[in-house]
Every structure is written in structure tokens, then in C-alpha cells.
Amino acid sequence: MCSRKFFVGGNWKCNGTVDEVKKICCMLNNGEVPCPNHIVKSMLRTDFQVAAQNCWKGKGGAFTGEISAEMLANLHVPWVILGHSERRQLCGETDAIVAEKTAYALDNGLKVCLCVGETLEERERNETGAVVARQTAAVASKICCWANVVIAYEPIWAIGTGKVATPQQAQEVHYNLRKWLDCYVSPHVAMNMRIIYGGSVTAANCKEIGANPDVDGFLVGGASLKEDFIAILNARNYQH
Ligand SMILES: O=C[C@H](O)COP(=O)(O)O
């Protein structure tokens, strides 16, 4: 029996003054629904969980500008987003680095939202499945327990562009990724892994994409900064 609970993450990225963050927290706290820092955590209802958007790949130390997994755990930040395409493309994070970070974060008690996804060129060359499998395989070579991992499929061409994947495109990639997990990790992990979709998700398209059997939630950028996010959180009507 599959017990995947619908999962929706808001990725505020590098946005938000204190006043803006207060406004979004207020919207969330008052929304009818079932972050990167400590201030946000203290402003939010306790049924929301906060995630950092990155962490260092190993033990903390002389790494200016970084935050370690231990520091996040110590701040009671339960989640970290790793492997986001903006980190991969803008900060040179390779599959190996993302895998190392994932293993270290898990070992230190964090839960990981692992992002994977292809560029437009890769999709046009029919490489989507291979890219997503390669990115996941790098992590699979470093971790044994997947219980605290959610995988976010985020096609890079859909991020912040308004060009959302069709429900069929999302379902196909999620289905194939689950099949890959079934073959190369285990049937148990495949069945229980939440594979969420990210890339131009809005209140208008979330229900149709979220209705697919292999879409277990969303990772939302732009729309998580707006009132739209409440509708996205409710895309599957209060599933618990
Ligand atoms: O992490 C979220 C994704 O990058 C999606 O961003 P977006 O919803 O603004 O397209």
C-alpha cells in the first residue's frame, strides 16, 4: 500500500525584505491549508516546515559564506533543498557535489528535497530520462536510506519562464523516474518516494498537474510569494 503524502514546498529563492516576508507569513498563517531562515521559522505556524536552500557539503569550518548541515540542524531547520538547477548552473554544483551534500545532510539529521531536471537542449535531444537518471544515480551511489528524501523534478526550461510542463510531460518523467528507482534502488523506495514537480506552477495549472498518479506535490518558486500559493497547497484538497 502506498502512503505518499502530498508535499508542497515554496522556494522563495533570493527574495523578500522583512516586510515582504511578514506579509507572506501572514498570508500562510491565515490561509485555509492543511525558508530559509530563523526569522521565518518563528513567524510561521508550526504546521509549516522550513527548508534551507543549500548547505555545505561536509563538516563546517573555514568556508566563508556557507552554512553547514550541523548548523541547520542546530537551528531546528528540518529540510534543505539541494541540487536546484540555479545552484548547479550558477554555482557550478556537479552531480558529485550534490550527492556529497545529500549524503552529509542526511547523515546529520536533515531531510532533503533533491532537485533534478533537464535543460531545453537536453529535452530536445530526448535525453530527459537519461539526465534525471544520471543525477539520481549520483545520489544513489552515496546514500542507502531514502526515507528522508523528496525528489523534485524541475525541468530547467520551465523554471520562472511561464512555460509549464504539460501534465503528460510531468507524469511521464515522474513515472520513468519511479521505474528507475524500482530497478536500481528498491521497489519499496520507488513506491514511497514523493516525486514533486517544479517549474511555473500556478493556481491555474496545479490541479491538473497534481492529479497525475506519479505527481506527489510541487516545488513552487514565483507563485509561493503570492496568494496563489494557498490554492497550490490545496491542489489535492487537504490530503493527509
Ligand atoms: O524551486 C522552484 C523552482 O525553481 C520553480 O520556480 P518557478 O515556480 O518560479 O518556476
Image (spheres, rainbow, N blue to C red):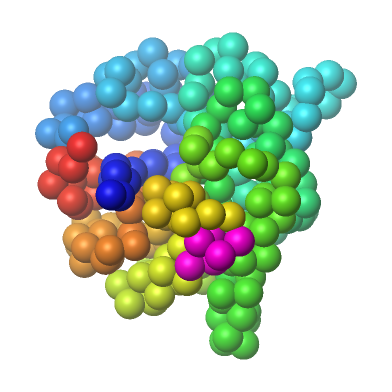
- Say if the magenta span includes residue 60: no
Which residue appears at 83% of the width and 19% of the height? 61
Can you tell which quarter of the image residue 165 is in? bottom left
Which residue appears at 15% of the width and 41% of the height? 238
Q: Nearer the viewer, residue 188 or 200?
A: 188
Can you tell which quarter of the image residue 240 is in? top left
Q: Nearer the viewer, residue 217 or 119?
A: 217
Which residue appears at 79% of the width and 23% of the height? 59
Task: Tell which residue pokes out farthest to the bottom in this image.
Answer: 125
Main SS, magenta residues: helix
Q: Position of residue 111 (x, y in %)?
A: 52, 32
Q: Position of residue 175 (x, y in %)?
A: 41, 69
Q: Nearer the viewer, residue 183 or 153?
A: 183
Q: Is residue 21 above or below residue 188?
A: above
Task: Tell which residue pokes out farthest to the right in this image.
Answer: 62
- Magenta span of residues: 179-184
Left or right, 98 with respect to 60, comes to left
